[in-house]
């Protein structure tokens, strides 16, 4: 039952994105969007759907909504940071690869976390190995794992734990 709810929410989310991207709407585009969203949401990956990890509770849906704004804030701040470093080349940068830890156990949670890290400028996920995520960071301010985890992961992880475990 949980998988059915997750797939239904996945379908609705994909279809809404499709409709937003194809505005102004026509019945033909809406139908094609529904078919594509249904195909993607029903697609099993490695025997099971990663959408099965999605929690469908009022708290999880509220955290999903909040996560959008948390990610948007991180995206804007990191874009400004990188732009500032480009425009002021005398600013020191200390690029490097750091190891951060994750508490997330589900494949969807880890996928969302690593994607969020990569999508924010200045950080790129290099590898995921067990509970360790190796991240290339444009300005390493904490070389130890605990400090890097606090700086890069904890803002996202708090919400993703509720959304998908």
Image (cartoon, helix red, strand yellow):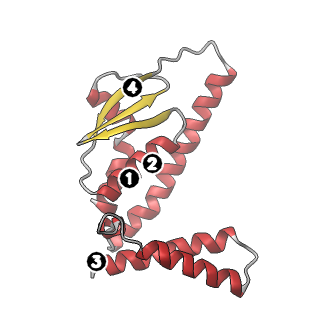
Q: Secondary structure at mark 2?
A: helix
Residue indicated by mark 2: 115
The image quadrant of residue 100 is top left
**Circle 2 residues within 10 Å: few <14, some 14–19, many ≥20:** few
Q: Position of residue 43 (x, y in %)?
A: 41, 72
- The disc, 1 or 4, on the residue closer to the chain's N-terminal end is 4
- The disc, 3 or 2, on the residue closer to the chain's N-terminal end is 3
Identified at 61% across, 77% down, the residue is 33
**Callouts 1 and 3 close, C-beta under 8 Å:** no
Identified at 66% across, 18% down, the residue is 88
Q: Position of residue 61 (x, y in %)?
A: 39, 69
- The disc, 3 or 4, on the residue closer to the chain's N-terminal end is 3
Q: Secondary structure at mark 4?
A: strand
Looking at the image, residue 95 lies above or below residue 43: above
Q: Position of residue 143 (x, y in %)?
A: 33, 21
- The disc, 2 or 4, on the residue closer to the chain's N-terminal end is 4
**Circle 1 residues within 10 Å: few <14, some 14–19, many ≥20:** some
Point out the image quarter for the C terminus. bottom left
The residues tagged by marks 2 and 4 sit, at their Cα atoms, a distance apart of 17 Å
Residue indicated by mark 4: 97
Residue indicated by mark 3: 2
Which of the labelled discs sits on residue 111, or is there none? Answer: 1
The residues tagged by marks 3 and 2 sit, at their Cα atoms, a distance apart of 24 Å
Point out the image quarter for the N terminus. bottom left
**Circle 4 residues within 10 Å: few <14, some 14–19, many ≥20:** some
The image quadrant of residue 83 is top right
The residues tagged by marks 2 and 1 sit, at their Cα atoms, a distance apart of 6 Å
């Amino acid at each position: 039952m949980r998988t059915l709810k997750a797939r239904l929410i996945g379908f609705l989310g994909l279809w809404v994105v499709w409709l937003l991207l194809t505005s102004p709407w026509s019945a033909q585009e809406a139908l094609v969007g529904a078919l594509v969203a249904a195909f993607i949401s029903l697609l099993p990956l490695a025997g099971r759907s990663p959408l099965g990890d999605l929690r469908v509770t009022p708290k999880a849906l509220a955290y999903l909504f909040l996560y959008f704004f948390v990610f948007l804030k991180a995206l804007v701040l990191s874009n400004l940071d990188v732009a500032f470093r480009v425009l002021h080349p005398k600013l020191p940068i200390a690029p490097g690869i750091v190891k951060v830890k994750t508490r997330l156990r589900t494949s969807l949670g880890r996928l969302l976390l690593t994607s969020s890290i990569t999508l924010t400028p200045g950080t790129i996920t290099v590898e995921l190995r067990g509970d360790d995520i190796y991240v290339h960071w444009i300005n390493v301010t904490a070389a130890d794992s605990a400090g890097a985890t606090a700086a890069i992961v904890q803002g996202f992880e708090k919400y993703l734990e509720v959304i998908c475990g």
